Image (tube, rainbow, N blue to C red):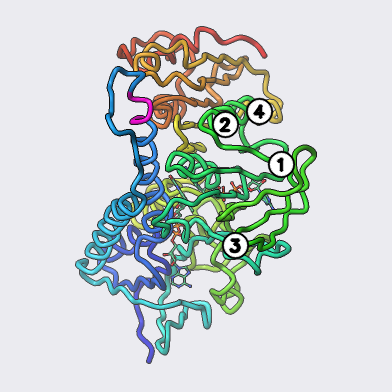
Amino acid sequence: MSTSYDAIVVGAGQAGPSMAVRLATAGMSVAIVERHLVGGTCVNVGCTPTKAMVASAYAAHLARRAGELGVTIPGGVAVDMAAVKARKDRIAGNSRRNNETWLESTNRLTLIRGHARFVGPGEIAVGGETLTAPRIFLNVGGRAATPDMPGLSEIDYLTNSTILDLDEVPRRLIVIGGSYIGLEFAQMFRRFGAEVVVVETAPRIIAREDEEVSAAVQKILEEDGVAFRLNASCIGFERRDGEIAAMVDCTAGAPEETGSHVLLAVGRRPNTDDLGLERAGVETDARGYIVVDDELQTNVDGIWALGDCNGRGAFTHTAYNDFEIVAANLLDGDRRRLSDRFPVYALYTDPPLGRVGMTEAQARAAGRRIKVATRPMSRVGRALEKGESKGFMKAVVDADTDAILGAAVLGVGGDEAIHGLLYAMQGGMRADVIRRTTPIHPTVAELFPTLMGDLAEA
Ligand SMILES: Cc1cc2nc3c(=O)[nH]c(=O)nc-3n(C[C@H](O)[C@H](O)[C@H](O)COP(=O)(O)OP(=O)(O)OC[C@H]3O[C@@H](n4cnc5c(N)ncnc54)[C@H](O)[C@@H]3O)c2cc1C
Ligand SMILES: NC(=O)c1ccc[n+]([C@@H]2O[C@H](COP(=O)([O-])OP(=O)(O)OC[C@H]3O[C@@H](n4cnc5c(N)ncnc54)[C@H](O)[C@@H]3O)[C@@H](O)[C@H]2O)c1
C-alpha cells in the first residue's frame, strides 16, 4: 500500500517532532516515523535520564558533606539505586508521553511506528507500507559506537542506554572513554557508591578542551574517588572469575583493571547505515554523517537532515536549532543559517563545565592575537558561601578587536552562568561592555566584569 503526504519526517528525536508539528500546523499532511521511543536519545537514554540521575548523585554527595554545612544526618547516608532508577524512569517516561500526546493530538499529523528506509528519492518503506512525499526530513540521530575491540563480544558490556537499567550499584565500574558520557556516568556512579576507574586512550580526558580544563576536571573527579588510566592502549577484555578484566597496558600502573561492570563510552555513530540512503542518492561523509549545506539541505532536492545525523552538532539544543533554521527558511522567509550558531554546551559533572565559543588552543590555531583571563572559583563569593568552590572561569578575547572569542566556567552554576557570555557573543558585545556592567551580588556571573578587567595578552 502506498500513501502520499506533503512531508515525511523520519525519527522523533529532538528536531523531528517540532518539524512535523510545524509543517502540519502550516497546513501540510505529515507522517512522522519512529522505530523505537518517541523523544529519541535525549528523552529516553540521554540528557533527561542522566541529568535526573546526576541530581540523585548530587543529593547523596551533599548529604555526605552535610556536616561541613552544620547539618547532621543521624544514621548516615545510603543510596537506594532502585528508587533512583524509578525516579529517573518517571521523569523520562512523563517527557516521552507528553511528546507522544503532542504528536498524536496534532491535526494532519500521523505518527507511524516502524523502521523507515528509502526505496527511492521521495519514497520510504515502513513495514509493508510505502510513503511518498516531495519533502523528507531526516532526524535519525545516533547510537553508541561499539568498535571491534578484542574480547568485547565475550563480555556483557554496558552502553549509555543499558547502564540506565541498573537497579543495583555496581561493585566496580570500568568506564572506557574519558569524555562527556564517560565522565558524567563515572562521577555519578562513584557517588552512588561504586568504585570507578576511567580508561582513556588519549593522554588527557576531554581532550577537546584546554589542558587546564582537562586537568581540573580530572582533579575534581579524583577528589570524589574516581581513578584514571590515561594513555591506555591495546584495550581488550576477558572474563575472569565472574568479573571482567580490561587490558589497559598503560605507560604506568598495572597492565589491567578488573571490575564487575564495563561501560563503553567511546563515542557515537549516526543511524544512517540502515536508512537506504543510497537508494535516494543522499551523500554521507566518511564517518556516515549526512552531508548538509548551511540550511541543512542534503545534496538531494527536497531532503533535509537535522540533528546528530548531520554531524554538525551533537546536542539537543543543536538539533532543535536545526529545526528552527529549516522552519525559518522554508516557512517564514527568514534566512537563518547554521553558520550563525556559536558552539555552546555543558558537561554535567559536579561542578559542571559551561563552555561557549573557542578554546584558547582553537583561538591560537586560528592565528588570533589573544588576551586571556582566569579566576579560580575559590575567589568567587557565591561559590565559597555554598561551600562549592572547585574549578575556575576563563575568558579568551581578541586582543585586536576586544571581541569575546570563548569562555569556560568550570564551577558551581557554570552551566547557567555561561549563558551571560553566550548572549553577549551572539549580540556582538565587546569585552569592555561586560567590564562596565553591574551584575547581581552574590552570583557566579557577577565575576564576569572582573574577569574582563583582568584580561592580559597571552
Ligand atoms: C548519555 C547521553 C547524555 C546526553 N546528555 C546531553 C545533555 O545533557 N545535553 C545535550 O544537549 N545533549 C546531550 N546528549 C546528546 C543528545 O541526546 C543528542 O544530541 C540528541 O538527542 C540528538 O537529537 P536527534 O534528534 O538528532 O537524535 P535522537 O534523539 O537520537 O533521535 C533520533 C530518533 O530517530 C529514530 N530513528 C533512527 N533511525 C530510524 C529509522 N530508520 N526509522 C525510524 N526512526 C528512526 C530513533 O529511534 C530516535 O528516536 C546526550 C547523549 C547521551 C548519549
Ligand atoms: N552534557 C552533554 O551535553 C552531553 C553529555 C553526554 C554526551 N553528549 C554528547 O554525546 C557525544 C558522545 O559522547 P562520548 O563521550 O561517548 O564520545 P566522545 O566522542 O566525546 O569521546 C569519546 C572518548 O573515548 C575515547 N576513546 C575512544 N576509543 C577508546 C578506546 N578504545 N579506549 C579508551 N578510550 C577511547 C576518546 O579518546 C574520547 O575521549 C558527545 O560528543 C556529546 O555531544 C553530550
Q: Nearer the viewer, residue 60 or 379?
A: 60
Q: Closer to the camera: disc 4 or disc 1? A: 1
Query: Between disc 3 and disc 1, whose residue precedes?
Result: 1
The answer for how far apart the CA atoms under marks 4 and 1 are is 12 Å
Q: Which mark is residue 202?
A: 1
Picture coordinates of residue 46, whole percent (x, y): 43, 53
Label 1 C-beta lies within 8 Å of the nearest ligand 2 atom = yes
State if disc 2 and disc 1 touch (CB < 8 Å). Answer: no
Which amino acid is tagged 3?
Gly
Point out the stretch of residues depicted in magenta.
62-66
Gap between marks 4 and 2, in whole Å?
16 Å
Mark 4 or mark 2, earlier in chain = 4
Disc nearer the start of the sequence (3/2) = 2
Q: Which residue is mark 2?
A: 222
Which residue appears at 37% of the width and 11% of the height? 437
| Residue named by callout 4 | 211
